[in-house]
Image (spheres, rainbow, N blue to C red):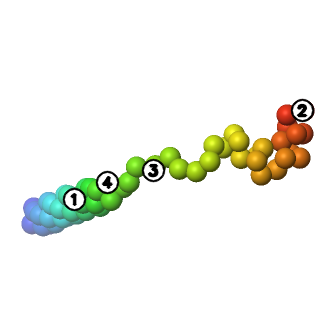
Amino acid sequence: MKHVITIADRAALRSLKLLVALNVLFFLSFLVVALLAAGQAEIPVRTGADTLSVPRTHDPVGSAITAAG
């Protein structure tokens, strides 16, 4: 009976070590991907027209209804 317990204990220890190793590898790969993504990220520059004046310049009828409403 003790021989069976010893084998089960060794198997459990090996499987836990394997799980720890896999978790460490997944965490390291996450860090690598996060750092690569952060290095390629760009801050958006404000370009384009003023969003409040766009309806008035592109749709004079709609802006008159909006101004009157």
Q: Mark 3 = which residue?
A: 44
Mark closer to the chain start, 4 or 1: 1
Q: Is residue 29 visible?
A: yes
Amino acid marked by disc 1: Leu
Dot 1 falls on a residue whose secondary structure is helix
Foreground disc of the pair 4, 1: 4
Dot 4 falls on a residue whose secondary structure is helix
Dot 3 falls on a residue whose secondary structure is loop
Q: In this view, does 58 lie to the left or right of 34?
A: right
Q: Mark 1 = which residue?
A: 28
Amino acid marked by disc 2: Gly
Mark closer to the chain start, 1 or 2: 1
Residue 23 picture location, percent across and down: 24, 58
Alpha carbon of mark 2 to alpha carbon of mark 3: how far?
Answer: 35 Å
Q: Is residue 34 visible?
A: no
Foreground disc of the pair 3, 4: 3
Mark 3 crowdedness (10 Å alpha carbons): few <14, some 14-19, many ≥20: few
Q: Mark 4 = which residue?
A: 38
Alpha carbon of mark 2 to alpha carbon of mark 4: how far?
Answer: 46 Å
Mark closer to the chain start, 1 or 3: 1
Front one among 25 and 52: 52
On the rendered image, what quadrant is the N terminus found in? bottom left
Foreground disc of the pair 1, 3: 3
Q: Mark 2 = which residue?
A: 69
Foreground disc of the pair 2, 4: 2
Asked whether disc 1 touches disc 3, contact meaning CB atoms under 8 Å apart, the reply is no
Q: In this view, does 1 lie to the left or right of 52?
A: left
Dot 2 falls on a residue whose secondary structure is loop
| Residue displayed at 22% across by 59% down | 28
Asked whether disc 3 touches disc 4, contact meaning CB atoms under 8 Å apart, the reply is no
